[in-house]
Image (cartoon, grey):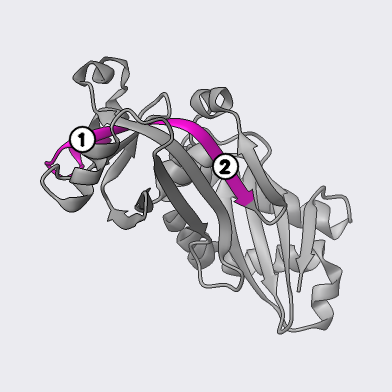
Amino acid sequence: MARSVLSATPSLRLRLGDATVDLIDSHAVLPDGTVVLAVDAMTQTGGLLVATRGRPGAVRLDVTQLVPVAVRSRVRARVRMLGTVRRLDPAALDSCDGDSIMSLLDLPPVALWALEPVEVGLGRDSGDTTVSISAYRTARPDPLADDEAEHLRHLTQQHGDVLGQVATLLVPALTTMPARVVPVAVDADGIVLRAETPDRHTDVRLPFARRITKSADLAEGVRTLLAEAVRRGASGGFALESVEHS
């Protein structure tokens, strides 16, 4: 999940000693998990990066991932990375795929710095965990992460009524109370619906029949999922994960 958060976020917070700066549209993630920062070497932040070059764990990145729709309790995850910064070695591009090269070309035309992770932490409602560096480096971002907000808007606009029906079938208690049902997450493995009532909310995860490996296959996956959810939900046979929050 940490790789998906870092790849999809447009901004991150960079901490260098006592100094903190927010970078917007100024980073990319290479296939091996190295984070590339675009920072002008002639700025104060660039000077601090120069001063910390090669010092293990001297640079910290913080990213807060929010649910990309207007709901309560929007914080989904927090990622913390401590790393060692150096100027980006052009030889690193030899191991990049086409998408990585394009993401680097989209960065501001200033100095590029490579941040090699030495510690990665992930915080969620279930608690904080430390991600091993080997697991972080071998992981790959979820294929839908970059376009998740757009996918959720489409689901709300095109399938909102059906999603509400599905949530009611899966959580019968919703029929006795006013609730707003919205999709709050979509990834390669399924959709998460949130039913909000005046004093609490319930998240329900609906798994896809098969893993979605590219955005082009999402529409068919959603149609199959919703049809199956309505059919099996009506008979009480749909497998789901439900978590209620106050």
In this view of the protein, can residue 235 be seen by the observer?
yes
Question: In the depicted view, which residue is nearer to us: 9 or 50?
Answer: 50
Residue 197 position, x and y percent, is: 72, 80
Q: In 3D space, how far apart are the residues under numbered discs 2 and 1 (Cα atoms)?
A: 24 Å
In this view of the protein, can residue 144 be seen by the observer?
no
Whether tag 2 and tag 1 are in contact, CB under 8 A, the answer is no
- For the residue marked with disc 1, what is the amino acid? Leu
Residue 76 position, x and y percent, is: 58, 57
In the displayed structure, 162 sits above or below 43; it is: below
Residue 31 position, x and y percent, is: 39, 25
User: Would residue 243 be found to the left or right of residue 207 on screen?
Assistant: right
N-terminal label among 2 and 1: 1
- How many numbered marks appear? 2
The range drawn in magenta is: 103-123
Is residue 107 on the magenta stretch? yes
- For the residue marked with disc 2, what is the amino acid? Gly
User: Would residue 46 be found to the left or right of residue 220 on screen?
Assistant: left
Residue at the spot x=31%, y=21% of the render?
Answer: 96
Specify the label residue 112 is tagged with. 1
In the displayed structure, 135 sits above or below 234; it is: above
List the residue tagged with mark 2. 121
Q: For the N terminus, which image quadrant?
A: top right
Residue at the spot x=53%, y=29% of the render?
Answer: 136
Residue at the spot x=52%, y=47% of the render?
Answer: 79
In the displayed structure, 221 sits above or below 77; it is: above
Question: In the depicted view, which residue is nearer to us: 187 or 46?
Answer: 46
Residue at the spot x=40%, y=50% of the render?
Answer: 9
Q: Residue furthest right?
A: 236
Is residue 223 on the magenta stretch? no
Question: In terms of secondary structure, where does tag 2 sit?
Answer: strand
User: Would residue 48 be found to the left or right of residue 131 on screen?
Assistant: left
Question: In terms of secondary structure, where does tag 1 sit?
Answer: strand
